[in-house]
Amino acid sequence: MKKSFKKTFIFIGILFILLKIGTSIAQEKEKFKEISLKPSGEVKQGQTVFINIKSPEKLVNPAFVFNNKKYKLFNSGENQYSGLLGVEALTNPGTYTISLTDETGNLKDQAIIKVSEKKFPSQNIAVSKGTAGLTATQHENNQINRMKTTVTDDLLGAVPPYNSPTAGCINSVFGVKRYYNGKFSGNYHKGIDIRANKGVPVKSITDGKILFAEFFRLHGGSVAVDHGQGLVSLYIHLSKIDVKAGDKVTSGQKVGEVGSTGFATGPHLHWGLYVHGTSIDPMTDWIKPVTICK
Ligand SMILES: [Zn+2]
C-alpha cells in the first residue's frame, strides 16, 4: 500500500515537471514571435532587410541591434513597429542576431539572419590628370555626412516597389571594386551608374524631402532626398538642379537632369541609396528594375 502510494507520488511529480517544462517552452515561443524579417533567414551583402514588429505591448523608443549597432524602429500601427536594416557590402558572411530592445534596454525579442557573400566585380577606370586629383571640399563632405546621419521619423510615403530615377541602362553596378588607372582605390562603388544623355530627367524614386541640392566640386550637381526612416537617395553629376533644400517632393517628381559634372567620365546618373548611412544595392526587388547596358 505504502509502495504504490510512493509510486503515484513520483508519477504525479514527473507529470508536474513535464507540464512545467511544456508551458515554459510555450511561453518562450510566445515571447519570441514579434519580429518578422523580409527577406527572412538569409540576406546577401549589400541588401536591405525590412523589419516588422508586432508587439504584445506598447514599446517606448523601440530599436534593434545588428552587428553591435543600434537602429531606430518606427511606429507603423497599434503596437506595431517597422524599420530598415542595410547590410553593408563588406559585412563578414555569417550568422547574425537581430535583437529588439526598447527604452529599458532589455531584450524583447530576437531573430537570426544569415549574411551570405555576394561576388562583386572589379572595374578599372581610366582617369585623366585633370580629374584624378579632384577632391571634395569640406562643405561637400559635411553635407554628405549629414545625409548619412539623417533619420527622419516620418513614415515612408509610398509602398514599394519604388521607381528607378531615370531612363537609361546600368553601366556600373553596386559594389564594384574600383581601380583608377589600374590602382585599387580602396573603395567600392556605393551606388549604381545609369547611363543616359545629358538633360534626361532625374526623378525622385518615392516621396521625400530635399536635404541638399547644390553643385559640389567632386560630386558635381547633387541632390539628396530624405525618404524617411533612414532611407536616403543621392543623385550626383547632374547638369541641372530643379529643387532646393527643404522642398517636399513626391514620387516621380523631377529633381534635376543627367550630366557629367564633378568627377565623371561621361554623362550618367550616379544613384546612391542609403539606409541609416549604409550604402545599399538599389538593384533589389523593392525597386523597379533598370536594365544593364549591353
Ligand atoms: Zn557611380
Image: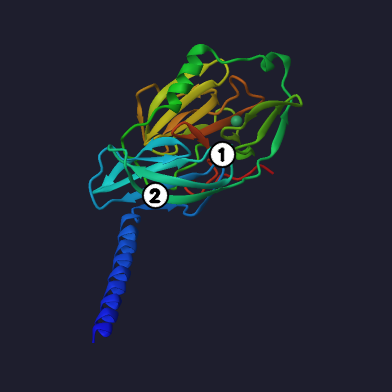
In terms of depth relative to the viewer, which is nearer, 55 or 123?
55
In terms of depth relative to the viewer, which is nearer, 211 or 105?
105
Task: Answer few, some or many: residues within 10 Å of disc 2's Cα (few below 14, many 20 plus, some between 14 and 19).
Answer: some
Q: Pointer 2 and pointer 1: residues touching (CB < 8 Å)?
A: no
Q: Please say which color scheme the image uses.
A: rainbow
Q: Is residue 121 above or below residue 210?
A: below
Q: Earlier in the sequence, mark 2 or mark 1?
A: 1
In terms of depth relative to the viewer, which is nearer, 81 or 140?
81
Q: Residue at x 51, y 29 (%)?
A: 235
Q: Is mark 2 within 8 Å of ligand 1?
A: no
* Helix, strand or loop status at disc 2: strand
Residue 209 on image: x %, y %: 36, 29
Task: Answer few, some or many: residues within 10 Å of disc 1's Cα (few below 14, many 20 plus, some between 14 and 19).
Answer: some
Residue 197 on image: x %, y %: 60, 31
Q: Is residue 261 above or below residue 195?
A: above
Quadrant containing ligand 1: top right
Q: Is residue 10 above or below residue 113?
A: below
Q: Residue at x 38, y 42 (%)?
A: 83
The residue labelled by disc 2 is: 110
Q: Residue furthest bottom?
A: 1
Q: Residue at x 59, y 39 (%)?
A: 168
Image quadrant in which the C terminus is located? top right
Q: Please state which amino acid type lies under the numbered disc 2.
A: Gln
Q: Please state which amino acid type lies under the numbered disc 1.
A: Thr
Residue 6 on image: x %, y %: 27, 79
